[in-house]
Image (cartoon, rainbow, N blue to C red):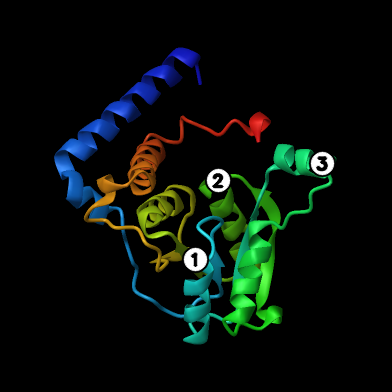
Amino acid sequence: MAPRIKRILVLLIVLGLVAAIALLGMSRIGYWLIVADPLERAAAIVVLSGDMPFRAIEAAALYGEKWAPEIWLTRESRPMLDAELKRLRIHHLHEDEYSRQVLTRSGVPDAAIRLLDGEIINTVDEIDLIRAELARRHANVVIIVTSKVHTRRVRATWHALVEQPLRAIVRPAPDRYDGARWWRNTYDALSVSREVFGLMNVWAGFPVKPDRQRL
């Protein structure tokens, strides 16, 4: 994609972000970002990376209700961070290792927890991993657990990248996001801005991509 065209697309996304907030209104957009698909039996429950421990807590609850026989985790790739901590001789756990502990302490057998093969840096990478694993297993349905504010973008990303018959049931975690008053604290405000911008990027065909050299 030519740099000039890319700059124009980015500008359109930003303008779309402003227009979306203006049209939907401050409180409505906070609720609009949250989706919860009807549950049905699936091949696995996937805990997307981030917002630990809430996503793992919800996945454990769904597992306990027997919606799926396995829970899949993903691992975020941070090579620069890992290298620097190694240089300083600082041991650290990856988020998926903490999520595994949350799951086992919530009653999920360790044998039912699987780390998907491949490191990720964003939602697109996670969707690609899940799609590949479903295809490998000849399965069609998966439950994806993510933060409330992130649910609509996950659903949109899945629909943009994955074809039928593969289906994702997107479910929100019991986090503290307040869709009615998201502008009252910086954490929720930044989350809403990121998600609306991310949705615009999905709808525009992903013109804005992560800088993998800086991770």
Q: Which residue is mark 1?
A: 55
Quadrant of residue 148 in the image? Answer: bottom left
Disc marking residue 88: 3
From this viewpoint, is residue 204 visible? Answer: yes
Label 3 or label 2, whichever comes before in sequence order = 3
Quadrant of residue 167 in the image? Answer: bottom left
**Above/below status of 110 relative to 165:** below
Under circle 3, the secondary element is loop
Which one is nearer the viewer's eye here, 135 or 115? 115
Determine whether label 3 and label 2 are within 8 Å by CB.
Answer: no
Determine whether label 2 and label 1 are within 8 Å by CB.
Answer: no
**What residue is at 49 percent from the left and 63 percent from the top?**
166
Residue lying at the far top in this picture: please name it: 4
Under circle 1, the secondary element is helix
**Above/below status of 64 relative to 23:** below
Which class describes the residues within 10 Å of circle 1: few (<14), some (14-19), or many (20+)? Answer: many
Q: Quadrant of the C terminus?
A: top right
The residues bearing labels 2 and 1 have C-alpha atoms spaced at a distance of 16 Å
**Above/below status of 8 relative to 171:** above
From this viewpoint, is residue 138 visible? Answer: no
Residue 105 placement, left or right of 30: right
Residue 123 placement, left or right of 187: right
The residues bearing labels 3 and 2 have C-alpha atoms spaced at a distance of 27 Å
Could you tell me residue 119's position as x and y percent? 68, 50
Could you tell me residue 140's position as x and y percent? 52, 69
